[in-house]
Image (spheres, grey):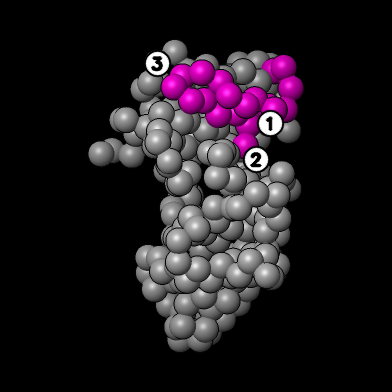
Amino acid sequence: DAGVIQSPRHEVTEMGQEVTLRCKPISGHDYLFWYRQTMMRGLELLIYFNNNVPIDDSGMPEDRFSAKMPNASFSTLKIQPSEPRDSAVYFCASSFGTGKGTGELFFGEGSRLTVL
Amino acid sequence: AQSVTQLGSHVSVSEGALVLLRCNYSSSVPPYLFWYVQYPNQGLQLLLKYTSAATLVKGINGFEAEFKKSETSFHLTKPSAHMSDAAEYFCAVSAYSSYKLIFGSGTRLLVRP
């Protein structure tokens, strides 16, 4: 399996622009997670999906952030409009949670976002 | 609610020395506990996990961790550090009924030659 695939790996944009980050989870995994990593706040869970349905979005910082999962093999995290404080590495992770899954997450390599 | 505390943002050891990275957890229900490693510019990789079976858990690359309920701890150890172990290590907790992992703040391990 190719693992969790994220794109783009690096994104530099200007304040006010729309940013879309993409994720392809591991085939067969039914949970998908979006995390944000910064020096100041560490790893923060933004939102997670089960069978394409958002379960908990309490970590989404504000309305400028939105996430979708239109099908089992694709998810997006969108920031509109972007701000410099959104600069971070955004990770997507997936897991096989049906039955009594133990919650092991498989992470992508991350998307490093810089907002100027 | 679950949370984890990692003591020490940086740990420095000599090559060949014992590695000890500390993690204490808080959980209102029996927890699942994990250690992940992150190499520069990469995602997180699972080192090992505790899921209520054996309290001493062995992972990859010679690492192991012991679940101690009385101390609410899940410290990570390795008998002999290698240069390749230099990375950031994260402890994480989730509840049995939840697939939501909560991560600690991380400990950066430096290995001196």
Residue located 68% across and 70% down the image: B70
Name the foreground residue: B84 vs B59. B59
In the picture of the structure, the residue carrying the numbered disc 1 is A59
Name the foreground residue: A108 vs B28. B28
Residue B72 location (% of width, % of height): 67, 65
Disc assigned to residue A44: 2
Return the disc, 2 or 1, that comes first in the chain's sequence.
2
Pointer 3 chain: A
The quadrant of the picture occupied by the N terminus of chain B is top right
Q: Is residue A72 visible?
A: yes
The amino acid type of the residue labelled 1 equals: Gly
Residue B90 location (% of width, % of height): 57, 57
Q: CA distance from mark 3 to mark 1?
A: 22 Å
Pointer 1 chain: A
Residues marked 2 and 3, same chain: yes
Q: Secondary structure at mark 1?
A: loop
Residue located 68% across and 52% down the image: B27
Name the foreground residue: A102 vs B62. A102
Q: CA distance from mark 2 to mark 1?
A: 7 Å
The amino acid type of the residue labelled 3 equals: Asn
In the picture of the structure, the residue carrying the numbered disc 3 is A71
Tell me: residue B37, above or below residue B44.
below
Q: Is residue A39 visible?
A: no
Residue B83 location (% of width, % of height): 44, 75
Magenta run includes residue A46:
yes
The residue stretch that appears in magenta: A44-64
Tell me: residue A3, above or below residue B77.
above
Tell me: residue A33, above or below residue A20.
below
Q: Secondary structure at mark 2?
A: strand
Q: Where on the picture, by quarter, is residue A73?
A: top left
